[in-house]
Image (cartoon, rainbow, N blue to C red):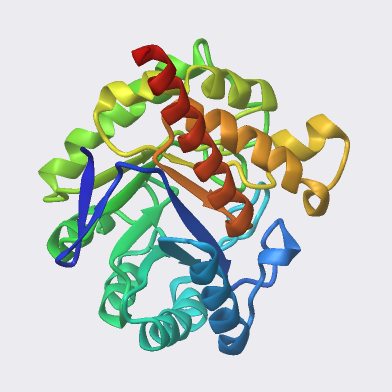
Amino acid sequence: MLSINCKGRLITFDIPLVMGIINTTPDSFYKGSRKENVETVIQTAERMLVEGATILDVGGQSTRPGSTRVPVDEELKRTIPAIEAIAHAFPNAFISADTFYAKVAEEAVAAGASMINDVSAGSVDDTLLETVGRLGVPYVLMHMQGDPQTMQQNPVYNNVVLEVFDYLNFKIRSLTEAGIKDIIIDPGFGFGKTAEHNLQILQQLDYFKKLGLPLLIGLSRKATIYKTLGITADEALNGTTVLNTISLLKGADILRVHDVKEAVEAVKLVQAFKYSSKNKAAL
Protein backbone atom coordinates (compact mmCIF):
# COMPACT_ATOMS: atom_id res chain seq x y z
CA MET A 1 0.00 0.00 0.00
CA LEU A 2 1.34 3.44 -0.96
CA SER A 3 1.69 6.04 1.80
CA ILE A 4 3.33 9.38 2.58
CA ASN A 5 4.54 10.85 5.87
CA CYS A 6 3.23 14.37 6.51
CA LYS A 7 5.19 15.71 9.50
CA GLY A 8 4.65 12.51 11.47
CA ARG A 9 1.13 11.77 10.22
CA LEU A 10 0.58 9.09 7.62
CA ILE A 11 -1.63 9.36 4.55
CA THR A 12 -2.37 6.01 2.90
CA PHE A 13 -3.78 5.42 -0.56
CA ASP A 14 -5.83 2.26 -0.17
CA ILE A 15 -8.70 4.46 -1.41
CA PRO A 16 -8.14 7.49 -3.70
CA LEU A 17 -8.17 10.87 -1.95
CA VAL A 18 -9.43 14.32 -2.86
CA MET A 19 -7.34 17.49 -2.67
CA GLY A 20 -9.35 20.73 -2.57
CA ILE A 21 -7.98 23.80 -4.36
CA ILE A 22 -7.90 27.10 -2.46
CA ASN A 23 -6.45 29.96 -4.51
CA THR A 24 -5.54 33.18 -2.71
CA THR A 25 -5.22 34.90 -6.08
CA PRO A 26 -7.23 37.50 -8.00
CA ASP A 27 -6.54 35.93 -11.40
CA SER A 28 -6.79 32.12 -11.33
CA PHE A 29 -8.40 30.78 -14.51
CA TYR A 30 -11.55 29.61 -12.69
CA LYS A 31 -13.01 32.61 -10.90
CA GLY A 32 -14.96 30.39 -8.49
CA SER A 33 -11.68 29.29 -6.87
CA ARG A 34 -10.44 32.80 -6.03
CA LYS A 35 -10.41 33.45 -2.27
CA GLU A 36 -8.87 36.84 -1.58
CA ASN A 37 -9.37 37.13 2.18
CA VAL A 38 -8.92 34.89 5.20
CA GLU A 39 -12.64 34.74 5.99
CA THR A 40 -13.53 33.21 2.62
CA VAL A 41 -10.51 30.88 2.87
CA ILE A 42 -11.78 29.50 6.19
CA GLN A 43 -15.32 29.13 4.87
CA THR A 44 -14.04 27.27 1.81
CA ALA A 45 -11.72 25.07 3.86
CA GLU A 46 -14.54 24.10 6.23
CA ARG A 47 -16.88 23.24 3.36
CA MET A 48 -14.24 21.16 1.59
CA LEU A 49 -13.34 19.24 4.74
CA VAL A 50 -17.01 18.55 5.50
CA GLU A 51 -17.49 17.35 1.91
CA GLY A 52 -14.64 14.88 2.29
CA ALA A 53 -11.37 16.52 1.20
CA THR A 54 -8.28 14.94 2.77
CA ILE A 55 -5.83 17.65 1.64
CA LEU A 56 -6.27 21.39 1.11
CA ASP A 57 -3.93 22.88 -1.50
CA VAL A 58 -3.30 26.59 -0.88
CA GLY A 59 -1.71 28.63 -3.64
CA GLY A 60 -0.95 32.31 -4.18
CA GLN A 61 0.33 32.20 -7.74
CA SER A 62 -1.82 31.78 -10.86
CA THR A 63 -0.14 29.34 -13.25
CA ARG A 64 -2.78 29.56 -15.96
CA PRO A 65 -1.40 29.85 -19.53
CA GLY A 66 -0.03 33.34 -20.11
CA SER A 67 -0.07 34.32 -16.44
CA THR A 68 2.40 36.82 -14.97
CA ARG A 69 4.69 35.47 -12.26
CA VAL A 70 4.12 36.95 -8.81
CA PRO A 71 7.26 37.76 -6.77
CA VAL A 72 8.00 35.84 -3.61
CA ASP A 73 7.03 38.63 -1.19
CA GLU A 74 3.58 38.99 -2.73
CA GLU A 75 3.04 35.23 -2.68
CA LEU A 76 4.00 35.15 1.00
CA LYS A 77 1.44 37.88 1.77
CA ARG A 78 -1.26 35.89 0.02
CA THR A 79 -0.60 32.39 1.28
CA ILE A 80 0.94 32.41 4.77
CA PRO A 81 -2.02 34.08 6.56
CA ALA A 82 -4.36 31.65 4.80
CA ILE A 83 -2.32 28.61 5.82
CA GLU A 84 -1.99 29.86 9.40
CA ALA A 85 -5.74 30.43 9.61
CA ILE A 86 -6.60 26.98 8.25
CA ALA A 87 -4.09 25.27 10.55
CA HIS A 88 -5.52 27.13 13.56
CA ALA A 89 -9.16 26.47 12.70
CA PHE A 90 -8.67 22.87 11.54
CA PRO A 91 -5.54 21.47 13.24
CA ASN A 92 -6.13 17.97 11.86
CA ALA A 93 -6.31 19.11 8.24
CA PHE A 94 -3.52 18.20 5.84
CA ILE A 95 -2.41 21.41 4.12
CA SER A 96 -0.39 21.55 0.91
CA ALA A 97 1.44 24.69 -0.19
CA ASP A 98 1.29 25.21 -3.95
CA THR A 99 4.54 27.07 -4.62
CA PHE A 100 7.82 26.98 -6.53
CA TYR A 101 9.67 29.31 -4.11
CA ALA A 102 11.89 27.87 -1.35
CA LYS A 103 11.14 30.78 1.00
CA VAL A 104 7.39 30.28 0.62
CA ALA A 105 7.80 26.54 1.17
CA GLU A 106 9.77 27.11 4.36
CA GLU A 107 7.35 29.65 5.81
CA ALA A 108 4.33 27.61 4.72
CA VAL A 109 5.56 24.52 6.59
CA ALA A 110 6.27 26.67 9.66
CA ALA A 111 2.71 28.02 9.38
CA GLY A 112 1.14 24.56 9.28
CA ALA A 113 1.54 23.09 5.79
CA SER A 114 2.79 19.51 5.57
CA MET A 115 3.29 19.09 1.82
CA ILE A 116 4.73 21.09 -1.11
CA ASN A 117 3.09 21.06 -4.55
CA ASP A 118 5.47 22.52 -7.15
CA VAL A 119 4.44 22.91 -10.81
CA SER A 120 8.03 23.70 -11.83
CA ALA A 121 9.76 20.51 -10.61
CA GLY A 122 12.38 22.71 -8.96
CA SER A 123 13.24 24.66 -12.12
CA VAL A 124 12.21 28.15 -10.92
CA ASP A 125 14.06 28.24 -7.59
CA ASP A 126 17.15 26.04 -7.55
CA THR A 127 17.12 25.93 -3.72
CA LEU A 128 13.59 24.54 -3.46
CA LEU A 129 14.38 20.83 -3.64
CA GLU A 130 17.08 20.93 -0.96
CA THR A 131 14.72 23.03 1.19
CA VAL A 132 11.93 20.47 0.87
CA GLY A 133 14.41 17.69 1.65
CA ARG A 134 15.52 19.51 4.79
CA LEU A 135 11.92 20.19 5.84
CA GLY A 136 11.12 16.49 5.53
CA VAL A 137 7.71 16.91 3.90
CA PRO A 138 6.18 15.20 0.84
CA TYR A 139 6.64 16.80 -2.57
CA VAL A 140 4.39 16.78 -5.62
CA LEU A 141 6.55 16.43 -8.73
CA MET A 142 4.78 17.72 -11.84
CA HIS A 143 5.73 17.73 -15.52
CA MET A 144 5.54 21.00 -17.44
CA GLN A 145 6.95 21.83 -20.87
CA GLY A 146 8.15 25.44 -20.81
CA ASP A 147 6.70 27.79 -18.20
CA PRO A 148 3.22 29.21 -17.57
CA GLN A 149 4.02 32.30 -19.63
CA THR A 150 4.86 30.29 -22.79
CA MET A 151 3.80 26.68 -22.22
CA GLN A 152 0.77 26.69 -24.52
CA GLN A 153 2.59 28.23 -27.47
CA ASN A 154 2.66 25.19 -29.75
CA PRO A 155 3.82 22.41 -27.37
CA VAL A 156 5.34 19.50 -29.33
CA TYR A 157 6.13 15.88 -28.39
CA ASN A 158 7.15 12.82 -30.37
CA ASN A 159 5.44 10.59 -27.79
CA VAL A 160 3.88 12.60 -24.99
CA VAL A 161 3.30 9.64 -22.66
CA LEU A 162 6.86 8.31 -22.87
CA GLU A 163 8.43 11.77 -22.70
CA VAL A 164 6.45 12.79 -19.62
CA PHE A 165 7.14 9.40 -17.99
CA ASP A 166 10.88 9.64 -18.69
CA TYR A 167 11.02 13.20 -17.36
CA LEU A 168 9.33 12.23 -14.09
CA ASN A 169 11.49 9.12 -13.75
CA PHE A 170 14.65 11.18 -14.23
CA LYS A 171 13.57 13.90 -11.78
CA ILE A 172 12.73 11.37 -9.08
CA ARG A 173 16.47 10.68 -8.79
CA SER A 174 17.19 14.39 -8.26
CA LEU A 175 14.54 14.54 -5.55
CA THR A 176 15.90 11.55 -3.66
CA GLU A 177 19.41 13.00 -3.89
CA ALA A 178 18.02 16.19 -2.31
CA GLY A 179 16.71 14.14 0.62
CA ILE A 180 13.04 14.08 -0.35
CA LYS A 181 11.62 10.77 0.85
CA ASP A 182 7.92 11.05 -0.03
CA ILE A 183 7.12 11.87 -3.67
CA ILE A 184 3.79 12.21 -5.46
CA ILE A 185 3.82 12.37 -9.26
CA ASP A 186 1.62 14.55 -11.48
CA PRO A 187 1.74 14.30 -15.31
CA GLY A 188 0.76 17.97 -15.53
CA PHE A 189 -2.46 18.07 -17.52
CA GLY A 190 -2.66 21.41 -19.34
CA PHE A 191 0.91 22.45 -18.58
CA GLY A 192 2.59 22.63 -21.99
CA LYS A 193 0.19 20.18 -23.60
CA THR A 194 -2.60 20.39 -26.14
CA ALA A 195 -6.00 18.83 -25.53
CA GLU A 196 -4.90 15.88 -27.67
CA HIS A 197 -1.74 15.45 -25.58
CA ASN A 198 -3.84 15.51 -22.40
CA LEU A 199 -6.25 12.89 -23.72
CA GLN A 200 -3.36 10.65 -24.81
CA ILE A 201 -1.93 10.82 -21.28
CA LEU A 202 -5.36 10.05 -19.84
CA GLN A 203 -5.76 7.06 -22.14
CA GLN A 204 -2.48 5.61 -20.85
CA LEU A 205 -2.56 6.94 -17.31
CA ASP A 206 -2.04 3.51 -15.80
CA TYR A 207 1.41 3.45 -17.45
CA PHE A 208 2.57 5.97 -14.83
CA LYS A 209 1.83 3.46 -12.07
CA LYS A 210 5.09 1.78 -13.11
CA LEU A 211 6.87 4.52 -11.16
CA GLY A 212 5.48 3.01 -7.95
CA LEU A 213 4.45 6.36 -6.45
CA PRO A 214 1.10 8.00 -5.63
CA LEU A 215 -0.41 9.58 -8.75
CA LEU A 216 -2.08 13.00 -8.56
CA ILE A 217 -4.42 14.17 -11.32
CA GLY A 218 -5.35 17.81 -11.89
CA LEU A 219 -7.99 18.08 -14.60
CA SER A 220 -10.52 20.19 -12.76
CA ARG A 221 -12.37 22.62 -15.09
CA LYS A 222 -9.36 22.85 -17.44
CA ALA A 223 -9.36 23.88 -21.09
CA THR A 224 -9.27 20.30 -22.36
CA ILE A 225 -12.77 19.98 -20.89
CA TYR A 226 -14.37 23.30 -21.64
CA LYS A 227 -12.84 23.84 -25.09
CA THR A 228 -13.70 20.30 -26.18
CA LEU A 229 -17.29 20.86 -25.05
CA GLY A 230 -17.53 24.43 -26.34
CA ILE A 231 -18.38 25.85 -22.92
CA THR A 232 -16.63 27.88 -20.19
CA ALA A 233 -14.70 26.87 -17.09
CA ASP A 234 -17.73 27.88 -15.04
CA GLU A 235 -19.77 25.24 -16.89
CA ALA A 236 -17.17 22.45 -16.78
CA LEU A 237 -18.12 20.60 -13.59
CA ASN A 238 -19.87 17.71 -15.33
CA GLY A 239 -16.98 17.28 -17.77
CA THR A 240 -14.55 17.34 -14.87
CA THR A 241 -16.43 14.51 -13.16
CA VAL A 242 -16.34 12.45 -16.36
CA LEU A 243 -12.57 12.76 -16.74
CA ASN A 244 -11.98 12.30 -13.01
CA THR A 245 -13.93 9.04 -13.20
CA ILE A 246 -11.74 7.84 -16.07
CA SER A 247 -8.67 8.84 -14.05
CA LEU A 248 -9.84 6.81 -11.07
CA LEU A 249 -10.46 3.76 -13.24
CA LYS A 250 -6.91 4.12 -14.57
CA GLY A 251 -5.21 4.37 -11.19
CA ALA A 252 -5.36 7.95 -9.90
CA ASP A 253 -4.59 8.20 -6.17
CA ILE A 254 -5.40 11.90 -5.65
CA LEU A 255 -7.91 14.10 -7.46
CA ARG A 256 -6.99 17.79 -7.22
CA VAL A 257 -10.27 19.64 -7.68
CA HIS A 258 -12.25 22.82 -7.24
CA ASP A 259 -15.43 20.86 -6.44
CA VAL A 260 -14.84 18.43 -3.59
CA LYS A 261 -18.34 16.98 -3.13
CA GLU A 262 -18.60 15.76 -6.71
CA ALA A 263 -15.07 14.32 -6.68
CA VAL A 264 -15.72 12.42 -3.43
CA GLU A 265 -18.90 10.99 -4.95
CA ALA A 266 -16.92 9.86 -8.00
CA VAL A 267 -14.41 8.10 -5.72
CA LYS A 268 -17.19 6.33 -3.81
CA LEU A 269 -18.95 5.14 -6.96
CA VAL A 270 -15.76 3.94 -8.64
CA GLN A 271 -14.77 2.07 -5.48
CA ALA A 272 -18.23 0.46 -5.36
CA PHE A 273 -17.92 -0.47 -9.04
CA LYS A 274 -14.48 -2.04 -8.53
CA TYR A 275 -15.63 -3.95 -5.44
CA SER A 276 -18.68 -5.25 -7.32
CA SER A 277 -16.47 -6.37 -10.20
CA LYS A 278 -14.15 -8.25 -7.84
CA ASN A 279 -17.07 -10.07 -6.24
CA LYS A 280 -18.40 -11.05 -9.65
CA ALA A 281 -14.97 -12.36 -10.70
CA ALA A 282 -14.85 -14.52 -7.58
CA LEU A 283 -18.11 -16.32 -8.45
Would you say 94 lies left or right of 266 here?
left
- Looking at this view, is 202 or 238 the one in front? 238
- Relative to residue 135, is residue 67 drawn left or right? right
Q: Quadrant of residue 167?
A: top left
Q: Quadrant of the N terminus?
A: top left
Name the residue: 67% across, 61% down.
28
Figure quadrant of the C terminus: top left
| Residue that sits furthest to the front in the current view | 283
The answer to which image quadrant residue 261 occupies is: bottom right
User: Number of labelled discs?
Assistant: 0
Tell me, yes or no, if residue 36 can be seen here: yes
Whole-percent x, y for residue 45 in the image: 52, 75
Name which residue lies at 39% across and 53% down: 118
Along the line of sight, which residue is nearer the eye, 215 or 93? 93
Look at the picture and state if 221 lies above or below 167.
Answer: below
Q: Give the residue displayed 73% in from the left and 65% down from the top.
A: 32
For the question of whether residue 60 can be seen, the reply is: no
Q: Nearer the viewer, residue 206 or 127?
A: 206
- Please state the horizontal and vertical placement of residue 70, each as a whole percent of the image: 55, 67
Foreground pick, 276 / 136: 276
- Relative to 156, say whether 82 is above or below: below
Whole-percent x, y for residue 44 in the image: 59, 75
Q: Residue reaching furthest right?
A: 230
Seen at 27% across and 26% down, the residue is 211
